[in-house]
Image: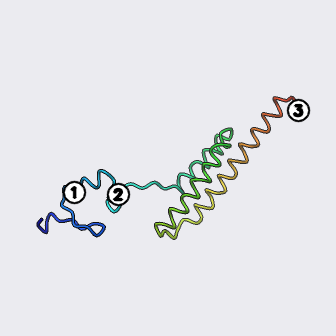
Amino acid sequence: MCGLCRVEVEGQSLCAACFDRGRSEGSLQAAQTTFRSWRTLGLHLGIVGLVLYPFGILAGPVSLFATARGIAQSRKDGDEGGALGTLVAVLLGLLATAAGVFFLVLIAGVVRGKVR
């Protein structure tokens, strides 16, 4: 393998064809070009849970789970920033959960005839 064809990645010397195959299979972590941002997903689910508050009972806890996974992802990747976004995502997740629970309690009261 000549110097032009050799690709050094993750401590391995690969030819261009093997590098392309590893990238397309997903076996080369360094060649990954798209990443899932769990923290952003948690933020978006919190917003959706507030806007569509009847679904907040589902979107809120999933938002909290995604945010927690995003915190773990940030620690693993060595990302230092994003504390404000994480705090906002947690607060939105808690608010969405509370709104969903409130909606269910309100509906249960209406069904039982206690709320007019």
Instruction: Give the spatial CA distance, label 3 vs label 2.
Output: 56 Å
Q: Amino acid at mark 3?
A: Lys
Q: Are marks 3 and 2 in contact (CB under 8 Å)?
A: no
Give the quadrant of the N terminus: bottom left
Instruction: Give the spatial CA distance, label 1 vs label 2.
Output: 15 Å
Residue at 21 percent of width and 63 percent of height: 14
Q: Are marks 1 and 2 in contact (CB under 8 Å)?
A: no
> Circle 1 is placed at which residue position?
18
Q: Position of residue 48 (x, y in %)?
A: 60, 44
Q: Amino acid at mark 1?
A: Cys
* SS state under label 3: loop
Q: Position of residue 102 (x, y in %)?
A: 76, 42
> Circle 2 is placed at which residue position?
32
Give the quadrant of the C terminus: top right
Q: Is residue 14 left or right of residue 66?
A: left
Residue at 49 percent of width and 68 percent of height: 79
- Mark 1 vs mark 2: in front: 1
**Residue sitting farthest toward the left:** 2
Residue at 68 percent of width and 41 percent of height: 53
Q: Amino acid at mark 2?
A: Gln
Q: Is residue 51 left or right of residue 114?
A: left
> Circle 3 is placed at which residue position?
114
Q: Is residue 7 left or right of residue 79?
A: left
Q: How is the image coloured?
A: rainbow
Q: Is residue 5 left or right of residue 68?
A: left
